[in-house]
Image (spheres, rainbow, N blue to C red):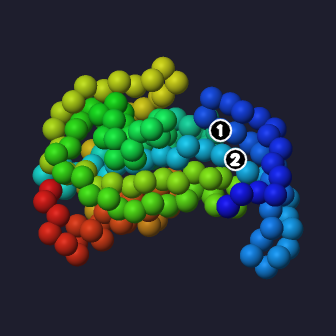
Amino acid sequence: MKPASETVHFTGRVIRVTTEQVVLPNGHRAELEVVHHPGGAAAVAVDAARQVCLLRQYRYVAGGWLWELPAGKLEPREPPLGTAQRELMEEAGVSARHWRPLGTCLSSPGVFTEVLHLYLATGVAPAATAHERAEVIEIHWLPFDTACDWALDGTITDAKTIVGLLRARFAITTTSVAI
């Protein structure tokens, strides 16, 4: 969809912010504020002992520490699976032999264009981490069922992590996923 008009207010390292004049499906014209984001990918890495990798990461904007899946933004011309594979190695220090798509989710579709691609990663093996200086991360391996409980009881508040864990649980329990 193309807006009738667009005004760019900010272009940064990751996002671009615009005001867009649009015509909605009901014919109404609206002015929308839009945050354009390249999108991201996340990995639900589950090992042979049914432990899942969660990062305890400091997020200034969220006001403190969050439990999250290894994830990151798509680089130009990088496919989402490549992003998930790269981020799993860089942030969690593991690689995976088997990858299964778990679909996408939208972080805040009323404002952000960001689409998050989710993957189940199994057959994990150690790899070297490469944390960025601006990342404050602790790597944890927890029982998969505990992490899913946390997704349901509010311990985990990050949306991509909640959706990823619960979709992975569905995939593991309803199909023959090799862990």
Q: Which residue is mark 2?
A: 35
- Compare residues 74 and 156 and report the one nearer the observer: 74
For the point 63% across and 58% down, the residue is 108
The quadrant of the rendering that contains the C terminus is bottom left
Q: Which residue is mark 1?
A: 15
Q: How many marks?
A: 2
Q: Secondary structure at mark 2?
A: strand
For the point 52% across and 24% down, the residue is 134
Real-space CA distance between mark 2 and mark 1, rounded to the nearest whole angstrom: 7 Å
Residue 155 coordinates in the image, percent (x, y):
47, 56
- Compare residues 178 and 5 and report the one nearer the observer: 5
Q: Could you tell me if the residues under marks 2 and 1 are in contact, i.e. CB atoms within 8 Å?
A: yes
- Compare residues 168 and 104 and report the one nearer the observer: 104
Residue 47 coordinates in the image, percent (x, y):
18, 49
Residue 83 coordinates in the image, percent (x, y):
38, 40
Residue furthest to the bottom: 26
64 to the left or right of 6: left
